[in-house]
Image (cartoon, rainbow, N blue to C red):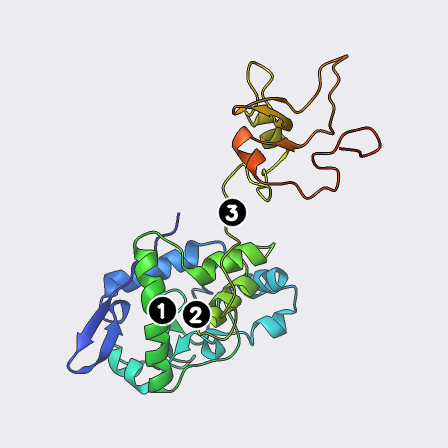
């Protein structure tokens, strides 16, 4: 399980700096976590000797190595090189291969010449106001992550994408946290209390496990047979006759909700009551 540690530190009266920009040990911990995580794989460690890194990430994205090499941290939507972030950096930010910036996805100082599987186009962040907005939008999700929770955008993406985690899902999470998508989308439909007309079992095994009738038979009950809160099983025994079509529910209590079928409560003989 990968655990990302986050935090903030103030510098004078200016906006708080991400703690990883001030704490080498914390930055290294978060960076190493991003390197090891299968869905991130930050790299290559040495841009001059990348090995199979670009080949592997190209296969993951189903693209060419040339295209993959253009999908860098330097043009990622979460790569922050704003003036205020430069001041948060403890030292020189540029070298012959590129420059350092702050990654708002994975919370460490990353290099513009590297990449990761969660890359999303749209960057870099060069404006202080946009940088501060990213920090504000991340604040709640970072606090939840610190507590081991997942935020709303993460949960929606996990539900919507068959391949998860993935670069597409991560990009969508970033856009969601920016407020660009899924603004009015609910995390998931609230499940109604078990036993009502619209409740759903997860699978057939759950359906058969429902205990609604007395004795050893278990299963659902026939609401047309209920008397004083007791009902017969939905399924008839061999040779048994009943005056009405079965009106089955998981429990006697659920029988209070009228069924939607036209035959609900009708006699079996040509639909007469």
Work out whether residue 78 or residue 41 is closer to the camera in this orientation and state it. Answer: 78
Above or below for 81 versus 3 = below
Image point (58%, 40%), residue name: 257
State the SS at label 3.
loop
Q: Position of residue 69 (x, y in %)?
A: 56, 73
Q: Position of residue 10 (x, y in %)?
A: 18, 75
Q: Quadrant of the C terminus?
A: top right
First of labels 2, 1 by sequence position: 1
Work out whether residue 33 or residue 1 is closer to the camera in this orientation and state it. Answer: 1
Q: Which residue is label 1 attached to?
A: 138
Circles 2 and 1, Cβ within 8 Å, touching? The answer is: yes
In three-dimensional space, the C-alpha distance between marks 3 and 1, rounded to whole angstroms, equals 29 Å
Say if residue 41 shows up in the picture: no
Image point (48%, 75%), residue name: 76
Q: Residue furthest front?
A: 273
Image point (54%, 74%), residue name: 71
Per the rendering, the mark at residue 191 is: 3
Circles 2 and 3, Cβ within 8 Å, touching? The answer is: no
State the SS at label 1.
helix
Q: Residue furthest right?
A: 270
Q: Which residue is label 2 attached to?
A: 177
Q: Position of residue 55 (x, y in %)?
A: 60, 63
Above or below for 30 versus 137 = above
């Amino acid at each position: 399980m990968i655990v990302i540690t986050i935090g903030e530190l103030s510098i004078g009266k200016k906006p708080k700096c991400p703690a990883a920009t001030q704490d080498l040990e914390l930055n290294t911990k978060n960076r190493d976590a991003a390197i090891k995580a299968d869905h991130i794989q930050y790299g290559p460690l040495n841009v001059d000797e990348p090995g199979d890194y670009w080949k592997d990430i190209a296969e993951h994205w189903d693209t060419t190595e040339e295209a993959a090499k253009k999908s860098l941290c330097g043009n990622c939507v979460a790569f922050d090189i704003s003036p205020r972030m430069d001041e948060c950096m403890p030292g020189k930010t540029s070298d012959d291969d590129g420059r350092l910036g702050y990654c708002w996805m994975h919370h460490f100082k990353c290099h513009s010449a590297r990449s990761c599987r969660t890359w999303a186009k749209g960057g870099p962040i060069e404006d202080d106001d946009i940088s501060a907005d990213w920090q504000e939008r991340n604040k709640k999700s970072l606090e939840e992550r610190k507590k081991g929770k997942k935020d709303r955008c993460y949960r929606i993406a996990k539900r919507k994408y068959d391949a998860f985690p993935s670069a597409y899902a991560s990009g969508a999470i970033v856009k969601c946290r920016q407020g660009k998508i899924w603004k009015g989308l609910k995390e998931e439909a609230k499940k109604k209390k078990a036993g009502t007309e619209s409740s759903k079992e997860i699978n057939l095994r759950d359906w058969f496990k429902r205990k609604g009738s007395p004795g050893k038979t278990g299963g659902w009950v026939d609401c047309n047979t209920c008397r004083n809160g007791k009902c017969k099983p939905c399924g008839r025994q061999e040779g048994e006759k009943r005056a009405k079509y079965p009106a089955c529910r998981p429990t006697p209590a659920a029988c209070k909700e009228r069924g939607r079928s036209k035959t609900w409560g009708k006699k079996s003989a040509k639909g007469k009551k």
